[in-house]
Amino acid sequence: MADLLPQELRVLVAVAGAHSFTGAAEQLGSTQSAVSHTVRTVERKLGAVLFERGRLGAAPTPAGERAVAHARRVLRMLDTLAAEVRSTARGTEEITGPLRIAAFRSAATQLLPAVLGGLRRQHPGLEPQVVIVREIGRGTAGEVADGRADLAIATLDHSAPPLPGLVATPLFREPYALVHPAGAADPRALPLVDWVENCGSYTRDWWRDQDWLPGGGLSAEDDVFALSLVAQGLGMSVMPWLSLVDLPAQVSRTDLGPEGPTRQVGYVTTADLARTGAVRALIRALRSAPLRPGLLPVG
């Protein structure tokens, strides 16, 4: 098989991002026919159809999704190679350029500001870029697997390995608590307010064993809205600790005790990215950050 060229990889990424050959051509300053020719060349080299062409544009096939994910990661490593070689040639260890981070909302809000503030003071040329991703399905780790992030703050499932090609390291355990309207006489008798990110393998067994948890109730798309519903007296909820910082005055938190559920939170990256200066610096900052009150050490 002939080697793929960096420009060919850029075309694949552009087509996937624009969902069309025409849009990719505009983005790359090229022509639709040149982009189409490049894609056909790559498909011939790889021996697979990478995009379904249709009136509505171009959609990656499963093989195309895999190819685009690899292309993003290879291009990222090429960019990092150039930046780090230039820094070494100047005789410095300066870390500059983008650092792409994916995180779920509560982790981004409660953990990253202090960590990134320290990083920017140490490395002024670093450009953190944070995307908030709901922790359902492939979640934040999927952003790294697909080449869109260098590192993800993720909930780690101890019963299943990380996505292929990724390495995961735990940082802490996050307990769950019962949240309810302040002053409720019997919070466990209230309707349940649930939210879509709330139940993973780390809580499922505990959840199933709680005969006081009602079915049905209200469902929310995110933890902030779920807490707003609780604040209005519409029910109670069982939520992880990072979502419960700075609770509204109308909401109280009750510990679920030593048998209550916890989830493990850590970071996910690739072995190659973990050796780059920017990701190494971020990992050091995450590991050295003080454990916030209420969170539990790993182990």
Image (cartoon, rainbow, N blue to C red):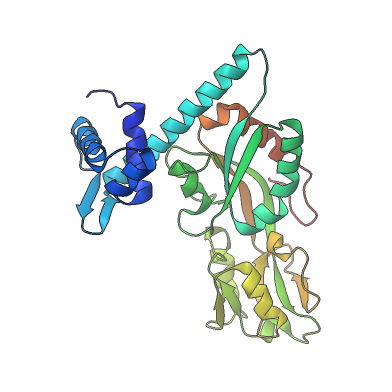
**How many callouts does the rendering have?**
0
Where does residue 250 sit, x and y in percent of width and height? 78, 79
Tell me if residue 10 comes above or below residue 186 in the rendering: above
Asked if residue 256 can be seen in this view, the reply is yes
User: Which residue appears at 26% of the width and 54% of the height?
Assistant: 57
In the foreground, 156 or 160? 156
Q: Is residue 201 left or right of residue 61?
A: right
In the foreground, 214 or 25? 25
Q: Quadrant of the N terminus?
A: top left
Q: Quadrant of residue 24?
A: top left
Q: Is residue 31 left or right of residue 241?
A: left
Where does residue 263 sit, x and y in percent of width and height? 62, 56
Where does residue 165 sit, x and y in percent of width and height? 44, 37
User: Which residue appears at 65% of the width and 53% of the height?
Assistant: 108
Q: Quadrant of residue 223?
A: bottom right
In the foreground, 180 or 272? 272
Tell me if residue 57 comes above or below residue 87 in the rendering: below
Q: Quadrant of residue 220?
A: bottom right
Tell me if residue 167 comes above or below residue 248 in the rendering: above
In the foreground, 168 or 134? 134
Q: Quadrant of the C terminus?
A: top right
Asked if residue 15 can be seen in this view, the reply is no
Where does residue 23 sit, x and y in percent of width and height? 33, 48
Q: Is residue 223 left or right of residue 115?
A: left
User: Which residue appears at 79% of the width and 81% of the height?
Assistant: 182
